[in-house]
Image: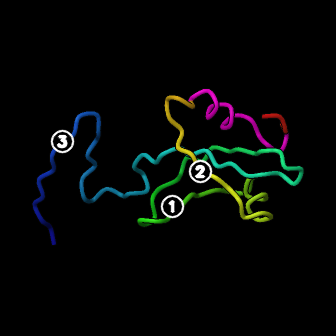
Amino acid sequence: MSTNVTFNEVAGRKNFGPDHALVTTPQPCVMIATWNKDHTPDVMMAAWAGQYDYKQIVVSMSKHKTTENLEQTGAFTVSFADIRTIAESDFFGLVSGRWNARL
């Protein structure tokens, strides 16, 4: 069943329409911070994150040092990457916490 829906255009945003798969739309980049066993911080960038419902978010991650820390401690923080944190988020996206322990 097809319906005719009118969408209002918003400056700076692309309207993909009602039949476009949500998974391919832009997702926010987030910094996920955990603690290593020696209490040093570990931060990674995750490019697939979104709001699950009013009180939950969902982040899709493969195996990383950060996921190991999450499994061990259950403690983490999530911060959105934005223009103020562009240098830090770029660093966290390029450098592995497994191989480079200095932040």
Which is more N-terminal, label 1 or label 2?
A: 1
Q: Which residue is mark 1?
A: 57
Toward the top, the furthest residue is 87
Which is more N-terminal, label 1 or label 3?
A: 3
Q: Main secondary structure of the magenta part?
A: helix
What amino acid is at disc 1? Ile
Q: Which residue is mark 3?
A: 9
Looking at the rendered image, the quarter that the N terminus falls into is bottom left
Q: Is residue 103 left or right of residue 90?
A: right
Total count of labels: 3
Q: Which residue is mark 2?
A: 78
Looking at the rendered image, the quarter that the C terminus falls into is top right
CB of mark 3 within 8 Å of CB of mark 1?
A: no
Categorize mark 3 by other alpha carbons within 10 Å: few (<14), some (14-19), many (20+): few
Toward the front, the furthest residue is 39
What amino acid is at disc 3? Glu
CB of mark 2 within 8 Å of CB of mark 3?
A: no
Instruction: Give the residue at x 47% y 56%.
Output: 50
| Range drawn in magenta | 86-99
Residue 20 at x, y = what percent?
31, 56
- Mark 2 vs mark 3: in front: 2
Residue 79 at x, y = what percent?
57, 46
